[in-house]
Image: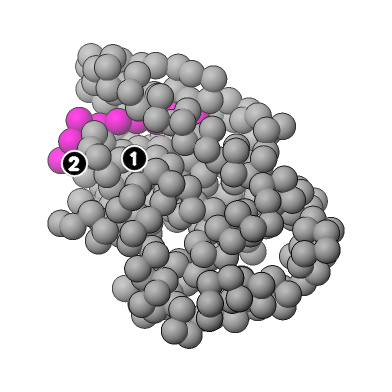
Amino acid sequence: MKIRFLCILILFSCACVSIETEKLERGKRVAVPYAGLEMGEQTTETIHFFVHAYSQETADNYARLCELYYSNIMNDTNLYSFVPARPYEVFIYKDVDEYVSKTKSPRWSGGITYGNAILTYESEGAKPILSHEITHLVFNEFMGLSRLEELRWLNEGLAVYEETRASLASKKYFEEKFQQVTAVNPIPLSQMINIVPLDENGPLVDKWYSQVFSVVKFMIEDGGSFPFSIFLKHLREGVSIEDALRESFHGKWHNLKELEKSWRSKIGI
């Protein structure tokens, strides 16, 4: 299977699998309802992660990757004041067969999240999965539960942005999809923020995901990580998207229309 095909499938398998919201409480450890690793499990605990694997070397390597991706997220969002209530748990199964057997997930899925945990298996493809899913864990905990569905575009756009920073294959895939299916006829931002593809095989999937990625990338890189962090904080407080844009990106974008005009100009569409 080509890695670029795997990346988009991973996106839908793991980004949307989570514990019921009423059970996800800040600071509460949630029992993962999947079979764990067999005897001989080794663990590595860092400031932000508790990694389970079959060898100490693997646990240490994945722990370093997790902290690297966490650091990237903090740098890009400027959310340095955010501190997870407890370390996120990461379970690294031996291979895809054990992963499928233990989690009952599709073979192509690559990884899933549940509560404050990520479950995946040893492979090169685990790198973009970890970056993508760590972003979701941070975003979900920072934002709380009240607006997660409403801000799905922002959650997914940021997760894909971080995924592309961890994987050149993912970066190439989403940039190509943007040129092929999005740039030719972009979704108006007023619609983009209110729709979410429900069918992973539907025609809107590539278009929506590549566009939310592009928009969030533009907001961070052109708007700045500090204003972006203020934007996130306003949204967490319940401020509307329009007001959050005006109050965060002073003098740059006062509303969605201005953001869209600036974004279109930047990418030449």
Who comes first in sequence, dot 1 or dot 2? 2
Examine the rendered structure and indicate whether residue 83 appears above or below residue 138.
Answer: above
Task: Please name the colour scheme applied to the rendered image.
Answer: one colour
Q: Residue 166, image x and y in percent?
A: 39, 43
Q: Is residue 134 magenta?
A: no
Q: Is residue 106 left or right of residue 118?
A: left
Of labels 1 and 2, the one closer to you: 1
In this rendering, does residue 184 appear at all? yes
Q: What is the distance, in whole Å, between disc 1 and disc 2 at their CAs? A: 15 Å
Q: Magenta segment range?
A: 88-98
Could you classify mark 1 by the number of other residues whose Cα lies within 10 Å: few (under 14), some (14-19), or many (20 or more)? some
Question: Could you tell me which secondary element the residue under label 2 belongs to?
Answer: helix
Determine the residue positioned at 38% across, 56% down: 171
Q: Tell me the amino acid under the disc marked 2.
A: Val
Could you classify mark 2 by the number of other residues whose Cα lies within 10 Å: few (under 14), some (14-19), or many (20 or more)? many
Q: Residue 87, image x and y in percent?
A: 53, 25
Q: Residue 109, image x and y in percent?
A: 28, 52
Determine the residue positioned at 39% across, 65% down: 175
Tell me the residue that label 1 is attached to.
127
Q: Tell me the amino acid under the disc marked 1.
A: Lys
Q: Is residue 76 left or right of residue 32?
A: right
Could you say which is closer to the camera, residue 21 or residue 231? Answer: 231
Quarter in which the N terminus is drawn: bottom left
Examine the rendered structure and indicate whether residue 111 appears above or below residue 38.
Answer: below
Tell me the residue that label 2 is attached to.
96
Question: Could you tell me which secondary element the residue under label 1 belongs to?
Answer: helix
Q: Is residue 89 magenta?
A: yes
Examine the rendered structure and indicate whether residue 13 appears above or below residue 267.
Answer: above
Dot label at residue 226: none
Could you say which is closer to the camera, residue 249 or residue 119? Answer: 249
Determine the residue positioned at 66% across, 72% down: 262
